[in-house]
Image (tube, helix red, strand yellow):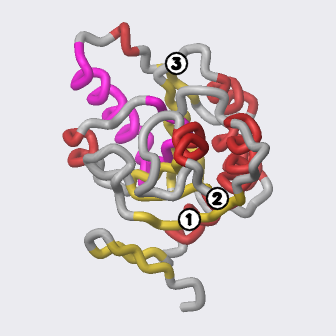
Amino acid sequence: MKAAVLASGRGSNLQSLIDEWQGGSLPVELVGVGSDNINAQALVRAAKAGIPARAFLRENYSDKESHELDILNWLEELGVELLILAGYMRVLSPSFIRQAEYPVVNIHPSLLPAFPGLHAQKQALEYGVKVAGCTVHFVDEGMDTGPIILQQTVPVFDEDNVDTLSERILKVEHEIYPEAIRLIVFGKVKREGRKVTIYRHS
């Protein structure tokens, strides 16, 4: 399955996918990495791994529609069958989601539907939760509202700050994102409306 990644920042989740892919345990062909940030470390990581990388800078487009259309055309040229968001800090429009003829997946550093949007770890700490975590989900037309594929919890300690909690969650993200992608590629994920069923032993 041909997969592309969109990322805006340091690309740590992208790197975990690259590591699994290069190790032979991620059954996809990573055909491209795109970013809306020319300085994204994700682009450097892609280049080091020999993956074609391209920047789609927002200032080069007159509006969001033309920006997204360029990305969609690029994905079509690559023959993408799965789009992976890895710290892509731009909400894809409903039009983009409708036009994408392949699954789009994302990972979010909270146990959705709790704490969607930006600064989820900070939101969790301020709310006083005792358990946090991360969620892999299909992307729909809302903000972190798509059907949930996998979730994993991490404890929240009294002495935690945003950095320590974020780091603990990130380690788990690096485990469950490749796992979710493997399940999708092997046909173990069935989506019916909001419900996602995982068939691990079939």
Range covered by the magenta-colored residues: 63-89
Tell me if 142 is positioned left or right of 54 in this view: left
Instruction: Tell me the kind of residue under disc 3.
Output: Asn
SS at mark 2 in the image: loop
User: Which mark is nearer the camera, 1 or 2?
Assistant: 2
Instruction: Tell me the kind of residue under disc 1.
Output: Gln
Q: Is residue 130 above or below residue 71?
A: below
Instruction: Tell me the kind of residue under disc 2.
Output: Lys
SS at mark 3 in the image: loop
For marks 3 and 1, give the CA distance: 28 Å
For marks 3 and 2, give the CA distance: 35 Å
Question: Which residue is identified by label 2?
Answer: 130
Q: Residue at x 36, y 30 (%)?
A: 71
Which sits earlier in the primary sequence, circle 1 or circle 2?
2
- In this orientation, which residue lies closer to the viewer: 118 or 171? 118
Question: Which residue is identified by label 3?
Answer: 37
Q: Quadrant of residue 116?
A: top left
Tell me if 169 is positioned left or right of 137 in this view: right
Q: Residue at x 26, y 40 (%)?
A: 96
List x then y, in percent, for residue 5: 52, 41
Quadrant where the C terminus is found in the figure: bottom right
List x then y, in percent, for residue 82: 45, 53
Question: Which residue is identified by label 1?
Answer: 151
Residue 85 shows in this picture? yes
User: Which mark is nearer the camera, 3 or 2?
Assistant: 2
List x then y, in percent, for residue 170: 69, 47
SS at mark 1 in the image: strand
Which sits earlier in the primary sequence, circle 3 or circle 2?
3
